[in-house]
Image: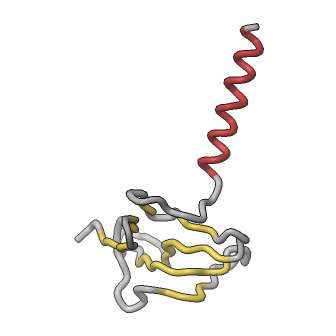
């Protein structure tokens, strides 16, 4: 009996881990997206989230953009970018309430 309970516990834990690692396609009020988090369309073709250009070194910071890109193409291919002229430089986040709000937590 203890072996059966242990196996059941491991099964439930693995289901929880796989569900939390899976890409989500909706946000609930109060939920946030940070950094590399993304929303993936129901059919998996598109993703919405933050992406960055360049690499971080001691002399510069990453420029983060909010956009929609093709999710199944290995090379990042944005189809829409919200803040192209005004990138977020650190700690990008999207807060969900009744609407979406993008914030630069560093400023």
Q: Is residue 34 above or below residue 20?
A: below
Determine whether, in the image, residue 40 is placed left or right of residue 45. left
**Of the pair 34 and 59, the residue shown nearer to us:** 34
- Quadrant containing the C terminus in the rendered view: bottom left
Q: Residue at x 67, y 24 (%)?
A: 9
What is the count of numbered marks?
A: 0
Q: Is residue 10 above or below residue 37?
A: above
Determine whether, in the image, residue 102 is placed left or right of residue 18. left
Residue most toward the top?
1
Q: x%, y% of residue 1?
A: 76, 7
Determine whether, in the image, residue 31 is placed left or right of residue 11. left
Q: Residue at x 72, y 78 (%)?
A: 73
Q: x%, y% of residue 4?
A: 77, 15
**Of the pair 52 and 94, the residue shown nearer to us:** 94
Q: x%, y% of residue 46?
A: 65, 76
Residue most toward the left?
107
Residue 84, picture quadrant: bottom left
Q: Residue at x 28, y 66 (%)?
A: 105
Residue most toward the front?
98
Q: Residue at x 46, y 78 (%)?
A: 66
């Amino acid at each position: 009996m203890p072996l059966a309970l242990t196996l059941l516990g491991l099964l439930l834990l693995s289901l929880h881990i796989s569900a939390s690692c899976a890409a989500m396609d909706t946000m609930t009020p109060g939920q946030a997206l940070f950094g590399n988090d993304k929303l993936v369309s129901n059919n998996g073709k598109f993703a919405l989230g933050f992406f960055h250009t360049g690499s971080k070194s001691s002399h510069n910071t990453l420029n983060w953009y909010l956009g929609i890109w093709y999710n199944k193409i290995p090379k990042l291919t944005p189809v829409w970018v919200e803040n192209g002229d005004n990138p977020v430089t650190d700690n990008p986040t999207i807060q969900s309430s009744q609407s979406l709000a993008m914030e630069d937590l560093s400023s």
